[in-house]
Image (cartoon, coloured by chain):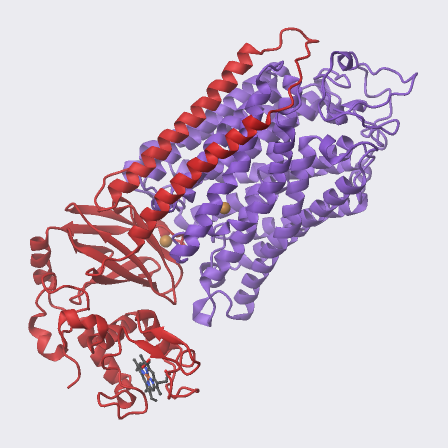
Chain colours: A purple, B red
Amino acid sequence: MATISQPAGQPLRSPRSPEIRETYLNASSGLRSWLFTVDHKRIAWLYLMAISFMFLIGSAAATVMRLELLTPQGDMIQAGTYNKLFTMHGVVMIFLFLVPSIPAVLGNFFIPMMIGARDVAFPRLNLLSWYVYMFGAAFILYALVTGGVDTGWTFYTPLSTTNYTQNVVPTALGILIVGFSSILTGLNFIVTIHKMRAPGLTWFKMQLFLWSLYATSLIQVLATPVLAITLLLVAIERTLRVGIYDPALGGDPLLFQHMFWFYSHPAVYIMILPGMGVVSELISTFTRKNIFGYKFVAISSVAIAVYGFLVWGHHLFVAGQSVYAGMVFSVLSFFVAIPSSIKVFNWTATLWRGSVSLQTPMLYALGFIGLFVVGGLTGLFLAALALDVHLSDTYFVVAHFHYVMVGGMLLAYLGGLHYWWPKMTGRMYPEFLGKISAVVVFVGFNLTFFPQFVAGALGMNRRYYAYDSEFQIYNVLSTAGSTILGLGFMLPLLYLTWSLKFGKLASDNPWGSEGLEWKSATPPPTENFDEQLVVVRGPHHYTAKEQVVG
Amino acid sequence: MGEQASSIAGQIDILFWFMTLASAVITGGIALALLFFSIRYRRRSENEVPVQTEGALKLELTWTFIPLILSAFIFLWAALLFVRMSRPEPNAMEIYVTGRQWMWKAQQPSGQWENNELHVPVGQPVQLNMTSIDVIHDFYIPAFRQKQDVLPGRYTTLAFTATKAGTYNLFCAEYCGTQHSRMVGSVTAMEPRDYQAWLQGENNAESPAARGLRHFESYGCDTCHRQDNGGVGPTLVGLYGQQEQLADGRTVTVDDSYIRESILNPQKQVVQGYGPPSRMPTYAGRVNETELIDLIAYIRSLGGQQQEQGGGGDDSLPGAGAEETPGTGPNSSTDGPKP
Ligand SMILES: [Cu+2]
Ligand SMILES: [Cu+2]
């Protein structure tokens, strides 16, 4: 990208011990300096800690479920416990991990740096968002430890408004509160990207990560309030017995599904667009080229965000929606796939005549493309009306969205974390172990979720705690795969932690990237850059001359 | 895709395999391209800088329009098939199904109730009219490639024609609480002759219309709805399938859902000339779902448009053609419309 005018006499950066220079990490110390920080980089770390913890909780639930599913009869835990586990897995992974993951951690850290700003537009609001998130998370965790909820993360009515577990209300309130954190973060990013760009950084000079997070923020701000209303009405119906969704009280059960998916389909894009942004950065850096068809990829992010609001009805094909409504939502859903396919083709074309370096982040990025393609194409199976009748609510759906959410978003998150780790910590992660982890995750993931496509196509229902024995083989494979996948996730957790103290010191720009964020020192000082950047060139513009700086 | 046992299963599977093949080609193509480029254009020296490519409009348009056309094609294919499988056959045999936590009940046209089982004749189009007593369930028969949510407070329908005798899994596919995974059963498709024999063996039941008549009397409906139209309410004879003129100016077709609403929520759709307000009391909370089904069967048996083919006064559910309908057994004398 983005050349910056470098005043003469500016020292050339080289690897150095972070202790010598003042950085955002050593500018102040003590727990208070972290808990009350308004530095976007430190807030990113607060989120990183919190969501890693949530990921562990969500994974623990998944582990117990996979063990139970080893045998067709329910023998290890009780049906009710199983139902609470998958509810917890869904709620924690979606609302407490995936939605905040890339935006709140990598976005917080790098949006200001990629636009050459000192911080986000509202640093204090940024800190407040984290506290709101923690407060909401506390509600949800409280509900989980005091008996749990067994409605599924979808909270379908009238089950959720009549069912016996008392924890539906605290969980719903927790999600509502976390939603506000999401809205505030989105708002902050939108204003930041509009108002804080360095001189010369026009919209089409922005890195694609910024475009995708901008699109994500739009969804967060516009869709999340609908979720808040939906869940508030569930709480009201439950506590005050006002008839909104329950036909016994004069309500309409389908109303809930329409409102819920009006948020939750766009939310799917909250959970994949940021991943697409990360992958665009990774591919640019590790091919030393700007993304092929940059403008199309940039615009497609916004197109996905806007268009994503029109397809919620594809979750209701067999729910009692009319045939004609089904047809409209089906055709719209097919077309929402187009912007995503444009991205995939352009990423692939970027490698063409590039300078491809298969470092760990790039391996994760390539894994992302493969799994996202499978996830996206199987989504079309579910958008195809006649086929969805057979496949909906089976393991085919489970496999489909795990390919998108885990194979897509989680791989992008891990790839991004490895990529920016040197900038964030000043240390390199061990490259060899990194490559191993990328391969192990990829293999484990496919072994876990591919058999679920088969089981689903054969008619195995999701949310079944005991199942027909004809499906056992696929479940055994899946459980075996999830063990490998679990190991694949443990590995980065261990070596990244290890590298905080023992990793090789990182230079300012170990990958030779032209991303603007790499123009800062490693780790960056509190104010990110020593002088005001002026951007004169488009994103990720690599020239032989520039290489000298890198 | 598993065993095929319904008239549409084969067509669904063709679509499935077509999409699988197309997806495999696309995924394979992209994977190969990535692999090839990664090797062919691998970084050879640390300071290597490749030629910067901007992108090409023609290429962008190509890979926008080819997926677009392919999508449109698959959409149409799947949508047409969907329309076909959602539309019930005119001569379908109608079976009422109720779901509740955590079991299925199905009622044969001749009145037998089955729990977690459903027997249907092979080759005969069947339409299930389904409702739930509590939360949302979903009636799913993988071998028939058919499923439909079952909602409280309204009827949804599911149509199929079994093509192969055998016993097939029946699952509840919408999460409905603790024992959701135990809300399973079986659908048995039988050769028409076996089906008849099975019905005879089971046949100790009163027909639904006959039971409906009993409810009609015990709930006092007959005091207002008299055959001669001389009561407080309109006569229900010949009502079913008609266009009803409502007091608020709308016209509605009298079907199961309309009758259900009329009984549970009379003020919502008031017949022209009878209010508003309707003088009919609400029966919500008094009449349960099985009684409702019986009452509807009774009102249908009083005649109406669809009734003609079955012959007036026949108590069997309309649409169940004469050949498929088993003899009504010893109860037939009590079945007809109220004299
Ligand atoms: Cu969706
Ligand atoms: Cu169920």
Where's residue A259, x and y in %?
Answer: 53, 57
Dividing the picture into quadrants, the one containing residue B126 is bottom left
Q: Is residue A513 left or right of residue A317?
A: right
Q: Is residue A251 left or right of residue A500?
A: left
Q: The N terminus of chain A appears in which quarter of the rendering? A: top right
Q: Nearer the viewer, residue B33 or B171?
A: B33
Farthest-out residue, right:
A9
The residue that appears at 77% across and 25% down in the rendered structure is A537
Where's residue A381, x and y in %?
Answer: 40, 39
Q: Is residue B228 above or below residue A260?
A: below
Farthest-out residue, top:
B45
Farthest-out residue, front:
B58
Q: Looking at the image, can residue A375 be seen?
A: no
Q: Is residue B318 left or right of residue B48?
A: left
Q: Is residue B257 above or below residue A351?
A: below
Where's residue B244, x and y in %?
Answer: 33, 78
Q: Is residue A143 above or below residue B23?
A: below
Q: Nearer the viewer, residue A385 or A202?
A: A202
Q: The C terminus of chain A appears in which quarter of the rendering? A: top right
Where's residue B35, x and y in %?
Answer: 50, 16
Q: Looking at the image, can residue A109 be seen?
A: yes
The residue that appears at 39% across and 39% down in the rendered structure is B73
Dividing the picture into quadrants, the one containing residue A355 is top right
Q: How many marks?
A: 0
The residue that appears at 62% across and 54% down in the rendered structure is A176
Q: Is residue A500 left or right of residue A58?
A: right
